[in-house]
Image (tube, helix red, strand yellow):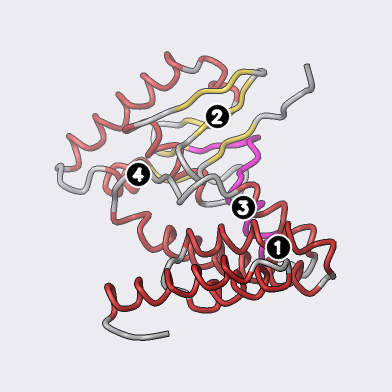
Amino acid sequence: MPFSPPSIAILGPLQLQLAQRAYLLTGNGAALLGYLALQGRSGFQATRSRLAGTLWPDSDEERARHLLSNTLYRLQRQVPELADHLVLSSETVGLMGLAVDAARFGELAAGGDPAGWQEALALYRGDLLEELDGEWLLNERVLMQEQFLATLGRASQHLAAAGPEHHHEALLLAHRWVQADPLDELAHALVMQLYARLGRPGAARRQYEQLARLLAEELGAAP
C-alpha cells in the first residue's frame, strides 16, 4: 500500500488521512478542525476564547468553552491518531504536522504552471467545508470558489490553445467550468468553440440554446 502522509482535506467534506486511515468528519469536530486547517500554517494556535466565540457565537462564553472542550474530547476518542497533531494548552488549541489541501490548492492555482493548475483542480473536491455553515467560513468559501473558477478558465483555455490533440481534454474541463458557473458566457463560448473544432456543430448549437435559455430564465437577457 502506498504511503499517505498525514493530511487534512477541507475542500469538500472534511477528511482526515492519518496512519493510513481515512476519517470523514462532520458537525462540531469538522468545524473545529476546519477552522484550524483554514489558517494554512502548520503550528497555528488559536485561543480557546476565540475558537469558542467563533464556532458557537450564539452561546455565552462559559457554555461555548464547554462545547469546545467536549468537542476536543470527542475528536480524540473518535480519532486517536489525532493526538499526535493537536497542540493543546489550557488557553490555546493548535494543529500541526498535517498537509492541508486548501493551502496547496491556493499555491498551485496562483502559480503560472499549467500542470499546477491541473493539480489544483484535482484537489478541489467541492466547496470549502461544504457541509458546514458559519459566518466565519463564508467569505473564505467565496474566495476559493472564485479562485477555482479562474483556474478552470485558465486551464481549459490553455488546453484549447495547445493544439488539436488537447481538444477533448479541454472540452472536459470547459464542461466542468460551465457546470460550476452556468451563467458564465465565456465558459459556454469555449465549449461551443471546441465542439466546432471537433466537428460537432449540432452539439455547439445545443450548447448555445442551453446558454440562451439559462440567461433568459435567470437574468431576462440574451447571449
**Of pointers 3 and 4, the one earlier in the residue sequence:** 4
Amino acid type at circle 3 is: Ala
Image location (x, y in percent) of residue 179? 48, 59
Give how far apart the Cα atoms at labels 1 and 3 are: 26 Å
Q: Amino acid at mark 1?
A: Ala
Mark 4 residue element: helix
Secondary element type, mark 1: helix
Which mark is in front, 2 or 1? 1
Question: Mark 4: which amino acid?
Answer: Leu
The residue lying at 27 percent from left, 73 percent from top is 217
Query: Residue, x 72% and y 29% (percent of image)?
Result: 5
Element type at mark 2: strand
Task: Work out how far the residue at label 2 is from the one at label 4, CA to CA, in angstroms.
Answer: 20 Å
For the C terminus, which image quadrant? bottom left
Q: Which residue is mark 2?
A: 16
Which range of residues does the magenta coloring cover? 94-110
Answer above or below: position of 182 versus 73: below
Reply yes or no: does residue 4 show up in magenta.
no
In 3D space, how far apart are the residues under numbered discs 2 and 1 (Cα atoms)? 32 Å
Judge by depth and name the residue closer to the eye, 106 or 124: 124
Which residue is identified by label 1?
170
Comparing 89 with 123, the one in front is: 123
- Describe residue 96's horizontal placement relative to residue 90 as left or right: right
**What residue sits 35% from the left and 73% below the top?**
213
Contact between labelled residues 3 and 1, with CB atoms less than 8 Å apart: no
Residue 21 location, quadrant: top right
Q: Residue furthest front?
A: 202
* Mark positioned earlier in the residue sequence (2 or 1): 2
Q: Earlier in the sequence, mark 1 or mark 3?
A: 3
Label 1 neighbour load within 10 Å: few <14, some 14-19, many 20+? many
Horizontal and vertical percent for residue 183?
Answer: 41, 72
Q: Earlier in the sequence, mark 2 or mark 3?
A: 2
